[in-house]
Image (cartoon, rainbow, N blue to C red):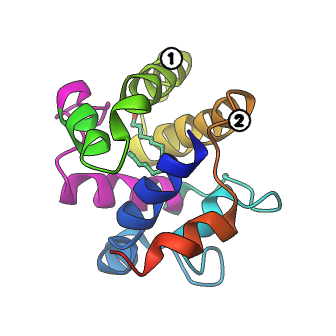
Amino acid sequence: TAEVMSHVTAHFGKALEECREESGLTADVMEEFKHFWSEDFEVVHRELGCAIICMSNKFSLLQDDTRIHHVNMNDYVKSFPNGEILSQKMVELIHNCEKQYDDITDECSRVVKVAACFKVDAKKEGIAPEVTMIEAVMEKY
Ligand code: B8M
């Protein structure tokens, strides 16, 4: 659900500052990770892909090939309140997007494409959170 996704995003987003430098993602492009879900934020910058890889690595969410680690991702999402109702769906949506961009060799470019695809599909599924929902739980992490 969108409520669970707001928790995942609030927690995951905390790793952004640690990844600013190495990803090259400027505050001008993305001030805070919660804006990922904003209606008017376009998921297009290669640097955002690099940042997502760096952030995911902090929680061991990726395999060596920079594709999602299904077990670790599942466990990560399940660690949040009611996470078990979102974990399988989330892994399924991300994996489905990964299959569509498997031919892109540049990792950062591929991951930002997968993330954009995931945002669209999560909205379709009604599990995309509003920025205000994320703000409401940010202080918990
Ligand atoms: C990686 C879990 C992050 C959950 C936070 C919410 C939204 C972030 C979207 C990133 C999509 C994950 C793309 C990683 C795919 C690698 O092939």
Secondary structure state at the residue bearing disc 1: helix
Q: Is residue 104 above or below residue 55?
A: above
Viewer-proximal residue among 84 and 70: 84
Q: Residue type at mark 2: give it.
A: Val
Closer to us: 132 or 13: 132
Question: Which residue is the site of mark 2?
Answer: 120
**Res 63 label:** none
Q: Is residue 74 left or right of residue 21?
A: left
Ligand 1 neighbours mark 1 (CB distance < 8 Å) = no
Q: Is residue 58 magenta?
A: yes
Q: Position of residue 108 (x, y in %)?
A: 44, 48
Residue 113 % position (x, y): 58, 38
Quick check: which quadrant has ligand 1?
top left
102, above or below 74, in the image: above
Residue labelled with disc 1: 96
The alpha-carbon separation of the residues under discs 1 and 2 comes to 12 Å
Graded by Cα atoms within 10 Å as few (under 14), some (14 to 19) or many (20 or more), the crowding at tag 1 reads: some
How many numbered discs sit on the rendered protein? 2
Chain-order first, disc 1 or disc 2: 1
Q: Quadrant of the C terminus?
A: bottom left
Give the residue drawn at x 59%, y 45%. 2
The image quadrant that residue 87 belongs to is top left
Q: Say what amino acid the circle numbered 1 marks.
A: Asn
